[in-house]
Image (cartoon, rainbow, N blue to C red):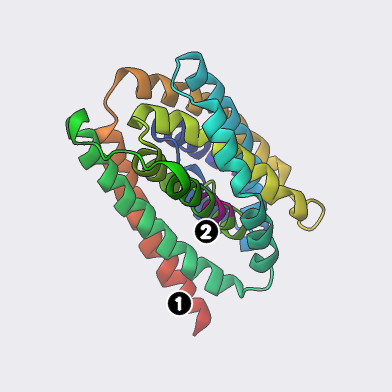
Amino acid sequence: MSAAIASPFGFLIGLSLGALGGGGAILTVPLLVYGLGLTPAAATTSSLLVVGPVAAWGAINHWRNDRVRLAEGVVFGLAGLGGSLAGSGLSRSVDPNVLLLLFSALMFSAALTTFWRIRKESSVPEQRERASSGAALAVKVVLAGTGVGFVTGFFGVGGGFVVVPTLVLALGFSLQEAVGTSLVVIAINSVTALVPRIGADDVPWIIVAPLLLAALFGTVAGSRVAGRVEPGTLAIIFAALVSILAAYTALRSVAGLM
């Protein structure tokens, strides 16, 4: 039954990553905790095992369609190595219910960021903010990369909902370039965050394997959506789903703290 439940949600996770450049792990962690009964620690580790390979596969599909700026993505990802390791270490010292309560706040932020992206996609290209330059640009990349890396390590998420706006606002990427390049960043951060967790948590492969397989198929479909269809409708559905899951996660975690 676990595999049967995991597969359709895995496809949805991959679809989100492929089409929107992020959001997959935002769905993965509450699914694993509340839908499949994993502990928060095991869920964040399992989430990284799914999101990392799926992001890498999605990046390849976007790169084939000239929607990835590889050099910038690698630099951004490497800037987050320290934050990712720090987040992974800190995560284990936090009460699971507090961790989930903080995660619910992160989910609300992801939903708000998604609505921001919908507004950006409806604006004309000339209205897009200009990229920073010189030292200011370098500082923004390092700070943003470190912050995204920390979020990845602490919560077990890719941080694409943070990466995409940063690439657009700080580096002047188009939204399609930002979506594709963010997957490179997510893959790097996920691998880095996973390293200190190896052997620390028992991974339920009977759940993770079908989830990962379905997500790989989903990201291929999502990549095609990103290239052919304006993802506004998909983004609205995603933001609404994340908001509902965030509210549920917050209520459950608060109840657990009482």
* Residue underneath mark 1: 254
Label 2: state its secondary structure. helix
Displayed quadrant of residue 123? top left
Nearer to us in this view, 245 or 233: 233
Residue at (67% x, 62% y) in the render? 86
Q: Position of residue 250 (x, y in %)?
A: 42, 69
Displayed quadrant of residue 215? top right
Amino acid tagged 2:
Tyr
* Residue underneath mark 2: 34
Work out whether mark 1 precedes mark 2 in sequence or the reverse, and give the earlier one: 2
Q: Which residues are magenta?
A: 145-149
Nearer to us in this view, 12 or 175: 175
Q: Position of residue 13 (x, y in %)?
A: 48, 38
Q: Residues within 10 Å of mark 1 (few under 14, many from 20)?
A: few
Q: Pick out the residue farthest to the front.
A: 134
Q: Position of residue 112 (x, y in %)?
A: 30, 53
